[in-house]
């Protein structure tokens, strides 16, 4: 049995100022028990958080985790299964999943958070 993971090309527009582009492969197929690797090339500084989210067929979105150049956060139940790595020179964010199973079949999305978490925390501290 093959495990099919189908990411999409995502383009996000931030409040009319400029657009950001995140590009993923059309599809990735992984044998059960093997390792998943999906790379997302982005047009912005990796000082901003990039998240990975998945959506199994017929189900809601599930947050996997997000990372910037100084920190990372993972959903507790998935942190031993997935890791997110950054390559700042190529502006690439890679999701790696180990021991993938048919239950991990989903559409996997990379997405940029609207602002860095530090900026968000600073904004909320002053309000």
Image (tube, rainbow, N blue to C red):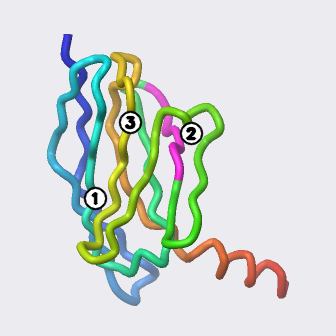
- Seen at 42% across and 78% down, the residue is 14
Which residue is the site of mark 3? 97
Image depth: mark 3 or mark 1 in front: 3
Answer whether residue 111 is magenta in the image: no
How far across and how far down the image is residue 103, in percent? 40, 18
What whole-number distance in Å separates the C-alpha atoms at marks 2 and 3?
Answer: 10 Å
Considering every residue shown, the one lying at the far top of the view is 1
- Seen at 60% across and 54% down, the residue is 73
How far across and how far down the image is residue 20, in percent? 32, 76
- Seen at 40% across and 57% down, the residue is 85
How far across and how far down the image is residue 47, in percent? 48, 78
Which residue is the site of mark 2? 79
Q: Earlier in the sequence, mark 1 or mark 2?
A: 1
**Quadrant position of the C terminus in the picture:** bottom right
What residue range appears in magenta?
59-65
Q: Is residue 50 left or right of residue 101?
A: right
What whole-number distance in Å separates the C-alpha atoms at marks 1 and 2?
Answer: 19 Å
Which residue is the site of mark 1? 40
Nearer to me, 59 or 30: 30
Name the secondary structure under disc 1: strand
Q: Quadrant of residue 123?
A: bottom right
């Amino acid at each position: 049995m093959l495990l099919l993971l189908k990411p999409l090309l995502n383009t996000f527009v931030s409040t009319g100022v400029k657009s950001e582009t995140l590009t993923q492969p059309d599809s990735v197929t992984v044998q059960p028990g093997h390792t998943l690797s999906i790379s997302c090339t982005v047009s912005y500084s990796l000082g901003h958080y990039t998240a990975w989210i998945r959506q199994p067929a017929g189900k809601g979105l599930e947050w996997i985790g997000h990372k910037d150049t100084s920190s990372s956060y993972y959903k507790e139940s998935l942190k031993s299964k997935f890791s997110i790595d950054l390559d700042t020179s190529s502006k690439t964010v890679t999701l790696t999943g180990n021991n993938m199973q048919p239950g991990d079949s989903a559409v996997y999305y990379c997405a940029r958070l609207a602002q860095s978490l530090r900026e968000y925390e600073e904004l909320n501290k002053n309000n």
